[in-house]
Image (cartoon, rainbow, N blue to C red):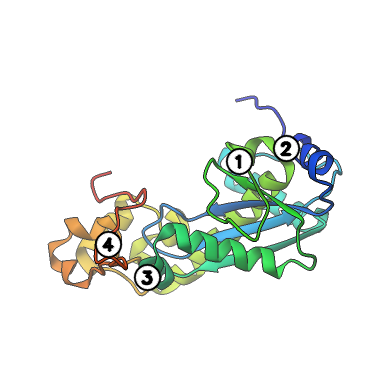
Amino acid sequence: MPYEPPTHTVERSIRATTGAKVIAGVDEVGRGAWAGPVTVCAAVTGLRRPPMGLTDSKLLTVKRRTELDAELRKWVTAYALGHASPEEIDDLGMTAALRLAASRALEALPVRPDAVILDGKHDYLGAPWKVRTVIKGDRSCVAVAAASVIAKVHRDKMMAELGSDHADFGFAANAGYPSPVHKAALEERGPTPYHRLSWAYLDALPRWQHLKKVRVQADGGVPEIEGQLGFDF
């Protein structure tokens, strides 16, 4: 399907209105997975013409995404990755875990960004970062699109490596997201050390419900599920 290539329009606007010089595009992958970390990439690209075919990683084939990742790592001015572990997701909740992973990525850049373009409509970063949220920024903004590809390829590779000792779960193919193979393995074997144990999928697994972690808020309440996919998604 044809698509419009990403541009530097948002970055130019931020530069013109705020005087920011170093602007990072930020995108995440792994938010809805049952296993593995949530991974965030921060990419600084400047205003140069991007590699041909750059777009949201989800619109690319595995082959093209991998090829583009290799090009982008050489092309970007700078990039860094940050992760929040399954344990941190269970303890903090997804919003705080995303903030943690994104902060780790941004702080790992060689130069601190003056501003951040964040994919989506919710600013999960907040102060001290100066954030511009852009819905579907991974399709429309060059830096965010670059971050989406680098994050996706890196996390997919990580999940394949983590799954080498848990072949029944198919992490190399599903990257920890729900799939028939993943579901069947969970029912038979229960969660691996890489699974998020506060996730709703455990509600449908009577044999393994005793492993579920319940995160309690400071006021004693139980937080709402943050966009999790249950077993019967």
The residue beneath circle 2 is 53
Q: Earlier in the sequence, mark 1 or mark 3?
A: 1
Amino acid type of disc 4?
Answer: Ala
Q: CA distance from mark 1 to mark 4?
A: 28 Å
Q: Quick one: SS at disc 3?
A: helix
Question: Quick one: 195 or 166, which is closer to the camera?
Answer: 195
Q: Position of residue 17 (x, y in %)?
A: 80, 39
Q: Position of residue 201 (x, y in %)?
A: 26, 56
Q: Earlier in the sequence, mark 1 or mark 4?
A: 1
The residue beneath circle 3 is 91
Question: Quick one: 3 or 225, which is closer to the camera?
Answer: 225
Q: Which labelled disc corresponds to residue 60? A: 1
Q: Earlier in the sequence, mark 1 or mark 2?
A: 2
Amino acid type of disc 2?
Answer: Gly
Q: Position of residue 202 (x, y in %)?
A: 23, 60
Lateral position of residue 214 relative to residue 143, left or right: left
For label 3, the crowd category at 10 Å Cα-Cα, with few meaning under 14, some 14 to 19 and many 20 or more, is some
Q: Earlier in the sequence, mark 3 or mark 4?
A: 3
Question: Quick one: 67 or 95, which is closer to the camera?
Answer: 95
Q: Quick one: SS at disc 1?
A: loop
Between tags 3 and 4, which lies in front? 3
Figure quadrant of residue 43: bottom right
Amino acid type of disc 3?
Answer: Asp
Q: CA distance from mark 2 to mark 4?
A: 37 Å
Q: Earlier in the sequence, mark 2 or mark 4?
A: 2
Q: CA distance from mark 3 to mark 4?
A: 25 Å
Q: CA distance from mark 1 to mark 3?
A: 33 Å
For label 1, the crowd category at 10 Å Cα-Cα, with few meaning under 14, some 14 to 19 and many 20 or more, is some
Q: Assess whether mark 2 and mark 1 are in contact (beta carbons under 8 angstroms).
A: yes
The residue beneath circle 4 is 185
Q: Which labelled disc corresponds to residue 15? A: none
| Residue 97 visible here | yes
